[in-house]
Structure formats: C-alpha cells, structure tokens
Image (cartoon, helix red, strand yellow):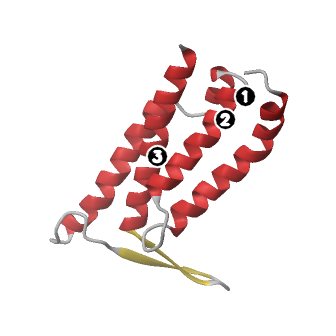
C-alpha cells in the first residue's frame, strides 16, 4: 500500500499502540486486559508496518524472529505454572515475591503475571507469523 496517510501515521501510532499493549499486559490479571489482549494490540502495531511499508520493514521493527517469541512465551508460561509444583501445590497455583525497592517501597511479582507475559509473547509471535506470511503472498 502506498497511502501517504498510512505511511505518516504508522511511525506515530505504532509506539503508542505498543506502550498501551504493555499497559494492558501489566494491568491484566485482576482487571480487564492481560497477555492476550496486549499481544493482539502489539501485533496490530507491527501489522501496520507491514501494511504501510512492507514485510521486511515489519520484520526489522519486530527485531525478533516470531517463532522464537512463541517458544519463549510457551516456556515462560510453563515455568510460571511449574513453580507451584516445587512447593507441593497444584499446577498454576499463584506464588508471589516481594522485592524491596529503596525509597519507593516494594514491588510484588507473581506467577500469574509471569504467565500473562508468556501468553503475550505467544499471541504476538503466532499473530506475527500469520500476518507476515499472509502479507508476503
């Protein structure tokens, strides 16, 4: 596509879309959002590059091979579910860790958040495989 509007809007909108997808990912577990919706929005941002310019530009902007995203996301999701098995709890039982941060308080990270990051990576990777392969045809 050679639309001047699309070529002008893509560099401006895609970073906002990626940041909003990360916001949805981080907001996720107990509120609307999460890894699936965030991954969809991130994939839409990179799909805009493929539409406005071409597939090679979109692949360059993604900077990671999509199958690698899928594999690492699956591994991360599996690892987050397996943490509870080490303590004798059922698979995917949530575990949380508090990390003290000087002057700011503490940061609480849990396995549900790690699972959401894995889902985010899987959704982004699968959609990029589909979108880029279709756009190349």
The residue at 52%/60% (across/down) is: 25
- In the image, which disc is placed on residue 121? 3
User: Which dot, 3 or 2, sits closer to the camera?
Assistant: 2
User: Which dot, 1 or 3, sits closer to the camera?
Assistant: 1
Q: How many marks?
A: 3
Mark pair 3, 2: CA separation? 18 Å
Q: Earlier in the sequence, mark 1 or mark 3?
A: 1
Q: From the viewer's side, name the closer residue of 82 and 103.
A: 82
Q: Is residue 31 above or below residue 40?
A: below
Q: From the viewer's side, name the closer residue of 114 and 13.
A: 13
User: Is residue 81 toward the left or the right of residue 39 in the image?
Assistant: left
User: Is residue 9 toward the left or the right of residue 104 in the image?
Assistant: right
Disc 2: which residue: 48
The residue at 19%/64% (across/down) is: 85
- Badge 2 marks a residue whose secondary structure is helix
The residue at 48%/68% (across/down) is: 32
Tags 2 and 1 touching, CB below 8 Å: yes
The residue at 64%/58% (across/down) is: 20
Disc 1: which residue: 52
């Amino acid at each position: 596509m050679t639309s001047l509007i699309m070529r002008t809007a893509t560099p401006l909108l895609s970073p906002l879309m990626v940041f909003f997808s990360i916001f949805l990912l981080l907001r996720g577990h107990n509120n609307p959002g999460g890894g699936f919706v965030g991954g969809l929005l991130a994939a839409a941002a990179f799909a805009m590059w493929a539409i406005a310019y071409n597939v090679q530009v979109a692949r360059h902007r993604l900077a990671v091979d999509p199958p690698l995203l899928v594999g690492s996301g699956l591994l991360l999701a599996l690892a987050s579910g397996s943490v509870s098995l080490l303590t004798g709890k059922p698979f995917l039982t949530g575990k949380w860790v508090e990390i003290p941060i000087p002057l700011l308080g503490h940061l609480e990270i849990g396995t549900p958040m790690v699972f959401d990051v894995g889902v985010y990576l899987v959704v982004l990777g699968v959609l990029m495989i589909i979108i880029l392969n279709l756009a190349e045809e």
